[in-house]
Image (cartoon, rainbow, N blue to C red):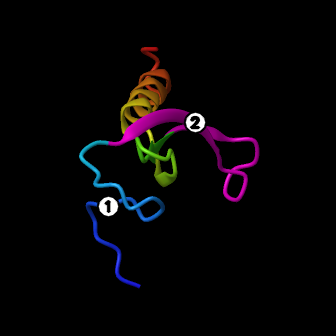
């Protein structure tokens, strides 16, 4: 099955943008009771989810805060 990168695989609408929404991602496989901030990318026409990813801005902020705490500065 060949899927064109610029079309929604569900409704076949041409994608010029995506709807981004915040979600929580549970990571119970590696660390019990650990939740990370994530985002979903959805088709603006049919709202089908095109992908899920960790929120890199929130992840970077969390890493900086944990480093500052570990260094006794946070």
- Magenta includes 24? yes
Classify residue 6 by image quadrant.
Answer: bottom left
| Closer to the camera in the image, 39 or 41 | 41
Tell me: 71 left or right of 49.
left
Does the magenta segment cover residue 44? no
* Residue drawn at 43 percent across, 30 percent down: 58
Residue positioned 40% across, 27% down in the render: 61
Give the residue at x 66% y 50%. Answer: 27
- Judged from the image, the secondary structure of the residue bearing numbered disc 1 is loop
Residue at numbered disc 2:
23
Q: Position of residue 52 (x, y in %)?
A: 49, 51
Q: Which residue is mark 1?
A: 7
Q: Where's residue 34, x and y in %?
A: 68, 41
Nearest to the observer: residue 72 or residue 59: 59
Residue 25 shown left or right of residue 4 in the figure: right
Check disc 2: other Cα within 10 Å, few if <14, some if 14-19, many if 20+. Answer: some
Image mark for residue 64: none
Q: Nearer the viewer, residue 73 or 24?
A: 24
Q: Which residues are magenta?
A: 18-38
Mark nearer the viewer, 1 or 2: 1
């Amino acid at each position: 099955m060949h899927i064109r990168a610029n079309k929604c695989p569900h409704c076949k609408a041409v994608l010029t943008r995506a709807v981004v929404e915040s979600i929580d991602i549970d990571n119970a496989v590696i660390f019990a009771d650990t939740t990370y901030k994530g985002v979903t990318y959805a088709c603006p026409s049919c709202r089908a989810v095109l992908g899920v990813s960790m929120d890199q801005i929130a992840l970077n902020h969390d890493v900086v805060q944990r480093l500052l705490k570990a260094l006794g500065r946070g």
